[in-house]
Amino acid sequence: MATNKQIRITQLGSPIGRPGAQRQTLIGLGLNKRHRSRVLIDTPAVRGMIRKVQHLLRIEEVK
């Protein structure tokens, strides 16, 4: 993965009723409410966090 490649993540699902680890992962990604987006650098660490909560997110590549 190139270090300058970016991805946009948008939170679609609510963390209500989810395990605490999933809530903390969303906070670590910079998300805390539905329909908020962040553009992040595509790194293995970010990909691992996204994989943990992928059922709550929409992921897009930024060109």
Image (cartoon, rainbow, N blue to C red):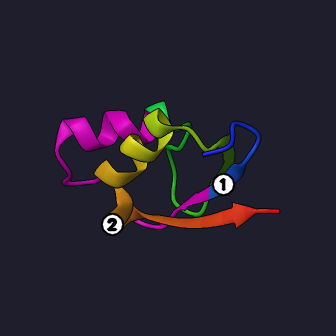
Residue drawn at 56 percent across, 37 percent down: 30
Give residue 42's position: percent from left, percent from top.
61, 44
The image shows residue 3, relative to residue 6, as above or below, that is above
Tell me residue 52's x, y (percent): 29, 49
Tell me, yes or no, whether the highlighted magenta stretch contains residue 40: no
Please name whichever residue, 5 or 10, is drawn nearer the observer in this view of the structure: 5
The quadrant holding residue 49 is top left
> Dot 1: within a 10 Å radius of its alpha carbon, few (fewer than 14), some, or many (20 or more) residues?
some
43 horizontally vs 54: left or right: right
Which residue is disc 1 drawn over?
7
Residue that extends furthest to the front in the rendered view of this protein: 1
Extent of the magenta region: 9-27
Residue at position x 16%, y 44% in the image: 19
Residue farthest to the right, as pictured: 63
Residue at 66% of width from left, 57% of height from top?
8
Q: Is residue 22 left or right of residue 19?
A: right
Question: Residue 29: x percent and y percent?
Answer: 51, 38
Which element is circle 1 on? strand
* Residue 62 horizontal side relative to residue 43, left or right: right
Q: Earlier in the sequence, mark 1 or mark 2?
A: 1
Give the position of the C terminus as an image quadrant: bottom right
Q: Secondary structure at mark 2?
A: helix
Residue kind at label 1, given as amino acid type: Ile
The residue to which callout 2 is attached is: 55
30 vs 56, left or right, is: right
